[in-house]
Image: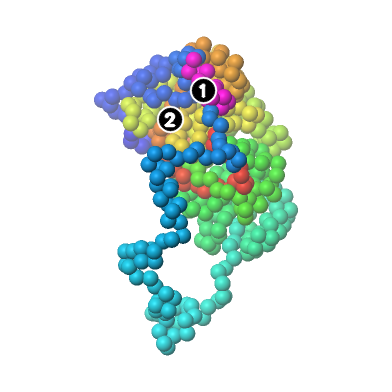
Amino acid sequence: MAAASGSGNGLPSDDAPVDDVPTGEIPVDLNPHPADAIYADGPSTSELDLVDVAEEGTDAAAPASADSPAPAPTGDDAGAVDAADDGAGETEPGAAAAPDDVLHEPEDVGSDTTDDESGEARRVGPEGETRPMESSGRPAPKAALVYNPIKVDADTLRHTVTRLASEAGWSEPLFYETTVDDLGDDVTRQALDEGVDAVLVAGGDGTVRAVSEAMSGSGVPLSIVPSGTGNLLARNLKLPLTEPEAMIRAVFDGDQLSMDVGWTELARPDGTTAEHAFVVMGGIGVDAAMIANTNPQLKKTVGWVAYVDGAARSLPSAKPFRVVYELPGHRLHSSKVQSVLFANCGRLPAGLDLIPEASVADGALDIVIFQPKGLFGWLFVWRRVAWDNSFLRRFRAGRRVLSLRTKDNAVVYSRGAGIELATHEARPVQLDGDEFGEALSVKTRVEASALLVVIPKGHTTDGL
């Protein structure tokens, strides 16, 4: 699909094959999404029973304990074991030396140094000349902290990072504050240029997004210290939200997880383009308008609850708009929608599961198309997200209910390497809960395992 321009000519030409999908219908060529599999046109009730049994492990074989004897080998295996036992400790030196058939003693191995060399390691310049060594050992690793001074207690945070780094034997950390002009990406690049071994980020979702964008593909681990109001990525990774010290300590003794990063190229009405990363989800349409209509002061006071106010301001006046979209490997489709989301994660605040099957490490993006018919249709959207996904699916009885009900088409799910879409008129765009202006076209892609994130030692990665 060609990039859009100010006149909206990013849309396909009249002779391009485009399927015009009626509002409320699902394109027939899209791959089935796991979010739909539990409904009546998904697996049968008997298949769900098998899934429940497998989850509970009722028919799983009991693992052998340390006190239980291992099964005795039989047949040829037994003979092989006996032969191995008979020969234990009696290997011939000549056989051990194969294929050279020579046993080397220490005095047979020549020295790495010549007679006129001391044998000590030395530092050399481009021409091979000897240069002085600054230290006798490897330099201690160093961490950098990027933080939003408005979202955190800066003095306490810096002191904690310094103390734990010292206890772990790391060098004195570097500290960078974000500003209105630098959300964290520029200072993070400065930290990477300094050769830091890890980066910590403390701030809102916008700060985490900006720092993640700069660190994508660097191979340097990132630790997310929960701060601010949303903490969407931390929630989706199931990190401790009320224990910042746990995430700081994890830098020095924790584990690491490779996760995907989404990238979005936006074509503006003035003809310019910009590309930005996202780690949770982005969208075009009413979801972005809702964020734009949220009162910033109210958000500072009550946190994510302020988005309810933004939704109340946006939904009554929301009107569907025509969008042409294409998933890699599929045909072009044209439909009227309220919003299109492209997600790397599926969990929202307040325990809402927008996409229960979303994974940060599957190398794909989950696409969600909202196409309710009028205000009444938004009730079906709410039922799908808040009732079906976030409540009924958690219980066996609830899954039985869903298996008897045909899914509604107010919410369409798909999955792929990205999505490319264009509109006739510029629409608002959001990335990880922040406004990103208006765009005529959006092109998304995923970079698999591009970001290395720190998790506490032993932290479960099931369902991530």
Residue 367 visible in image: yes
Q: Is residue 18 above or below residue 156?
A: above
Tell me which amino acid carries mark 2. Answer: Arg
Colouring of the image: rainbow
Pinpoint residue 380: horizontal percent, then vertical percent. 55, 16
What element does badge 2 sit on?
strand
Start-end of magenta stretch: 46-59
Q: Nearer the viewer, residue 456 or 134?
A: 456
Q: Is residue 196 above or below residue 448?
A: below
Pinpoint residue 194: horizontal percent, then vertical percent. 54, 63
Q: Is residue 435 left or right of residue 90?
A: right
Residue name at image x 56 percent, y 32 percent: 62
Residue name at image x 62 percent, y 47 percent: 457
Q: Which residue is mark 1?
A: 51
Q: CA distance from mark 2 to mark 1?
A: 22 Å
Report the residue that reaches farthest toward the top.
Answer: 404
Q: In which image quadrant can residue 53 be found? A: top right
Instruction: Tell me the crowding category of disc 1: few under 14, some 14 to 19, or many 20 or more residues within 10 angstroms, Cα based.
Output: few
Instruction: Tell me the crowding category of disc 2: few under 14, some 14 to 19, or many 20 or more residues within 10 angstroms, Cα based.
Output: many
**Any mark on residue 415, and which?**
2
Pinpoint residue 10: horizontal percent, then vertical percent. 35, 33
Q: Quadrant of the N terminus?
A: top left
Residue name at image x 68 percent, y 62 percent: 166
Is residue 48 on the magenta stretch?
A: yes
Q: Nearer the viewer, residue 209 or 452?
A: 452
What element does badge 1 sit on?
helix
Tell which circle, 2 or 1, labels the residue nearer the N-terminal end: 1
Q: Tell me, yes or no, whether the two marked residues, 2 and 1, touch with CB atoms within 8 Å.
A: no
Residue name at image x 55 percent, y 54 percent: 188
Q: Is residue 319 above or below residue 90?
A: above
Q: Quadrant of the C terminus?
A: top right
